[in-house]
Image (cartoon, helix red, strand yellow):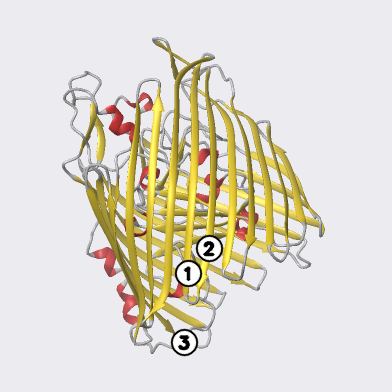
Amino acid sequence: MNKTLLPAALLPLLTAATHVVSADDNGKLEQMSVTASRVEIPRRELGVSVSVVTAADIERLGYTSLLDIMRTLPGVAISNNGGAGKVSNLYLRGESNYRTLVLLDGVNIADPANTQVATQFQHLLANDIARIEVLRGPQGMMYGAGAGGVINIITKKADAPLGGSLAVGAGRYGSRDTSASLYGESDRWDYRLDLGVLETDGFNSQVADSSGERDGYRNRTASAQLGYQVTEALALRAQARHTDSESEFDGCFAGFSTSNNCLDEYKQASYRLSADYRVADVAHQLAVARQDIERDSLSAGASSFAVEGGIDELNYVGNTPVAGGELLWGAEYEQQEFSSAFSARELDSLGLFSEWRAELAGLLHYSIGVRRDRLENEDHDSWRSSIAYPLLLGKEAEAKLRASYGTGYRAPSPFELAYNIGEGAAPVGPETSRGYELAAEYRLAERLQVELVYFDQQIRDAIVFDYRLGNSGFGAYGQDDGESSSEGLELVMSGNLAERLDWYFNGTFLETEDADGEQRLQVPEQVYNLGGSYHLPGDRLALGLNWRHVANRLSAAPGFFGPAVSLDDYNRLDLKASYRVSDSLQLNLRGENILDEDYREVAGYNTAGAAVYAGLELTL
């Protein structure tokens, strides 16, 4: 990709904006983000790229899976191996999900028992999600290892003295979904209980399986949270979450042959206790969290590979206004553990970080932060800086110019460390990343919002598996000598027409290279989303749609042997209609892939055809 032409695409916007005198904010950009700096920051002051999905957006889309919601966002691509509950990967600006940190109500929900520490996105339901913030680009300074990007998932909280809901739905492939909630709040207390159940008979996941048998999936997720306002200065919160799932799949090993009678059992439990305390202008947050993972793969009914993992976390964040700016500081300790019948390993890390945010001459917002992480074998330093220049162009119009640069790293996983204990296998260290972005934004009240972002990021010393390494004959993990890169443009647009019609468009134009100069596998070069919603007069009937186009994608050959396979470009159209019968009853109808597009996201794996789902929702 031409590194000169891409930044030049921003010059007309940058030049036009610099001739405008800035003024006070008109109130429309005073939306807040909690992910960029761990504390609430007005989005108009941010110099980094953050996408936000609200509860209203989730309701409009109607998807039951978090993955389907994430597909609609800029910079995001998804690959799925054959339907609900099957192995899935999320790529953020071309980086795989093991380079992306995912937080669910502040808990790192990555699977440390995986080959690389990565979130199992396919098991995340959407029924209790209130907000998603996606922070794009390397964020090692603020979040430490594995934060080549950050996805912050925030669940619903109580918003009434007593409330609840019950939703049921069913559709093609023998799919049934149920969700229920109960919540309440008083002057000091608030609580919420949620339950989500998804069951589907599925479809034949693997092309090579000619039997036509279905590969089903079952997921039961329950969560609970309790908050107590001890004093005006002190608030406590406890939360717990448990997921139990089973997924049928094809192509596992049974002895010395392959079988299509395969089952993956997955259990995940997480717990978190937190305290927020404020003394004058100084705010403190202290949290302790624990996550446990159990996975077992069964071939023809017999366990073939069982693993367990866990993550312990202790986090502290403080912030206070100082000398016309804001100082943030923090510390976090994390221990990851992995064990199987063959090996076990723990990995500890301790991080210290600080960020300074301020305003220059009432015009320019800037930040700079540094971090040091102490790993088992070495220390690692990360930093990030950003600037944002918001301008008022008129009574309702405003613009913002921004830029940021950040670094990050990924520590080797417990599995990678445990695997390299054989003779002749050298220890592996962290891989490092750096990235920068330039952006221009324009907003005309609620009628039009435009964002254009150019980004460029690199990975060095990538940890890779090589069959030629070590003396065991089974290979070992090593580190690439070269550099892999991801460069592209993101165009994000949204608006409102006649108050009843909302629309959005985003396009991601991406060029990636691995250390050998080849396009990265599973990462499409072009992804577009076009969608919107329309509320008919009376606000009883609402219609929504999302159209997605994916182009120029390479996939590993089926079975991982042979040259990469070029996948066909595809278009997918999803529709949703909802009708509010009364204040407490709503009917929903959703169509997915209604044009029945035959496409692949991973070579050798099928995707769902046209499907219709219907349901109803009761609220107290």
Distance from Cα at disc 1 to Cα at disc 3 = 27 Å
Q: Which residue is mark 2?
A: 276
Q: Secondary structure at mark 1?
A: strand
Q: Would residue 556 be seen by someone viewing this image from the given angle?
A: no
Mark closest to the chain's N terminus, 2 or 1: 2
* Residue 157 versus residue 340 in the image, above or below: below
* Residue 584 versus residue 589 in the image, above or below: below
Q: Secondary structure at mark 2?
A: strand
Q: Nearer the viewer, mark 3 or mark 2?
A: 2
- Amino acid of disc 2: Asp
Q: Which residue is mark 3?
A: 24
Tell me residue 561's x, y (percent).
31, 24
Tell me residue 267's x, y (percent).
54, 32
Label number found at residue 62: none
Label number found at residue 283: 1
Give the quarter of the figure containing the N terminus. bottom left
Distance from Cα at disc 2 to Cα at disc 1 = 7 Å
Q: Is residue 513 left or right of residue 277?
A: left
Q: Nearer the viewer, mark 1 or mark 3?
A: 1
Q: Are marks 2 and 1 in contact (CB under 8 Å)?
A: yes
